[in-house]
Image (spheres, helix red, strand yellow):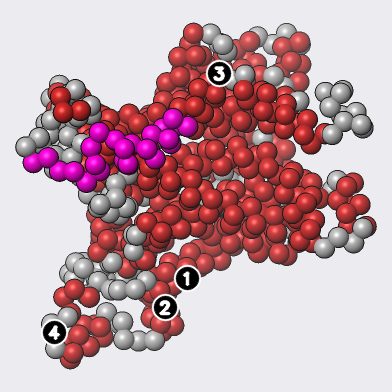
Amino acid sequence: MAAASSPGNRLGTSIWRDALYRFSVNRAAMISFWIIVVLAVMAIVIPIWGPHPVDAVYWDRILIAPTLENRHWFGTDANGRDMFVRTLYGARISLTIGVLTTLVALVIGVTYGAIAGYFGGRVDVVMMRLIDVLYAVPTLFLVIILVSAFGNNFLLIFISIGAVEWMTLARIVRGQTLAIKGKEYMEAAHALGLPASRILLQYILPNVVGPVVVYVTLLIPINIIVESYLSFLGLGVQEPFTSWGRLISQGSGEMEMAPWLLLIPAGFLTLTMFCFNFMGDGLRDALDPKNR
Amino acid sequence: MGLYVLRRLALTIPILFAVIVLSFWLMHAAPGGPFDAELIDLDPKVVESIRAAYNLDAPVWKQFLDYLGALLQGDLGPSLVYSDLRVSQIIATGLPVSVTVGLSAIAIGFTVGIGCGIAAALRQNSFVDYTVMAVAMTGVAIPTFVTAPLLILLFGLYLGWLPISGWGGGDPKHLLLPVIALALPKVATLARITRGAMLEAINTDYVRTARAKGLREWKVITRHVLRPMLIPVVSYLGPTIATVMTGSVVIETIFGLPGIGRAFVEGASNRDYPVVMGIVIVYAVFIQILNLLVDVIYGYLDPRIRQSYGRPGMTTAGAGLGRSK
């Protein structure tokens, strides 16, 4: 603490290095991190070089329970498709949607929040009122309206989810920005006559990164769930694509005869939720100023 | 206090109006209508008269004003798909189902969740604490569309104890599984919130003072810890109650309950716009009322907040906090 705040020390790198260290000794967070990495790599590799092609249909092997025979490790579904490959193909889409929607939310939320907080006054009031209005309608309702009104291809789904989930992020960034505004270095920046865009990018953004990183880690699983809800209701990704939500939905239709069709994708989804939650907790502990 | 409530009510009117404008605009910007499939082969004259019957031939601003006028008289318009039903009838039949299931789930979440949270906080870092937190973490991480089929599989299909689907005219046996599935994440979230808030309250100076002056421990807890602890709980409960009362879309779909959550999904996929808009507006009204209630309850729980009611520029503390899906 004393060393980190001494004038000769580069405060910025040191804080981040501290955070990285604190994260790396958090066992639950690190294990979660590696599980996600392994899952992501498998999601990329297995549908390409897995034991079966994604679109292979084995009419003679329908609803087979998990077995080593014919390398159907997770069994087959009602159409005779290999569940191991399909689960990881679902992982590919679920994870991609989780990350892309969060990126959309990140860009909108950070820009919106920083502008509202930085300009303050009437701009802030109007921008925050708009968020109040959107908050008056539940997220899932909004996404369902957007998706059913404008179609449910891959691109529109992730734009719809991202366009709805940015509001909390905007509030966080606005709060941070308001807190930073009173600081001396901001006055110095104004005194130097820097343009607003430069102040936003160089002075405000670096200071909001901490809470934003934590929230983003928690937003990825939320968005995966939102997409799964959509797919579960039949409004999400359509064949030949699949996602965990779709697999769970199909699995719960067959669960009496073939419970593994439900249990396997549900297990994968749950594991992923746990990992992101542990990572989010770990990051929050690592970046929490109270721990410095 | 009364003035504060009036001022808050005045604030909600523009919000509700904006919600109506927004959803009306979205519905009309959407490509395609409910009659697209049926109208292709029909005589243009028939098409014209159908559109006229639903006021779809008027200019959009006129449609909006007509809608608004009817809305002020409590009429949400006709359903475009079920031609003999009004939207208000659809909502009136669905709402009791959703409210029954939702409020039962909230009651369970409130008692069990808060109970577990308090138990965990009073014995921090004990076996009880770790168990409660592990279970709560699981409850938060697993979505309802996973727990619901698992509950059906276990209690409905393997054990055969409970019916797996349908409303059964409000028969408690039919309600048990959907209520439990809906309550689980609420229990988990409330246990986490309660534990955190309680630990924070226990470590404050005024609790140390209360203990130092020799107050008995249970009195410290009931008088100085429970009240501040309830603030985050209340801000979570407000919007959550609004959400569950207007129907859990997924739970109602899985268990085949005729609530308004299912009516909403059906309406959205049938492009039955008046139904969708009607339910969105009902929800928006609910959430505004509950947010107002939350802010009023804050005042009872925390005297510092009560004082700020008199001041201009007070924050609407309840709005948006602890928003749930």
Is residue A280 shown above or below A220? Answer: above
Tell me the quarter of the image containing the N terminus of chain A: top right
Mark-to-mark CA distance, 4 and 2: 27 Å
Total numbered labels placed on residues in the image: 4
Write down the chain letter for disc 4. Answer: B
Mark-to-mark CA distance, 3 and 1: 50 Å
Magenta stretch containing residue B88, yes or no?
no
Badges 1 and 2: C-beta atoms under 8 Å apart?
yes
Foreground disc of the pair 3, 4: 3
Mark 3 belongs to which amino acid?
Answer: Arg
Residues tagged by mark 1 and mark 2 found on one chain of the structure = yes
Q: Residues within 10 Å of mark 4 (few under 14, many from 20)?
A: few
Badges 4 and 2: C-beta atoms under 8 Å apart?
no
Query: Which disc number belongs to residue A156?
Result: none
Mark 4 belongs to which amino acid?
Answer: Leu
In this view, the residue in front, B29 or A191, is: A191
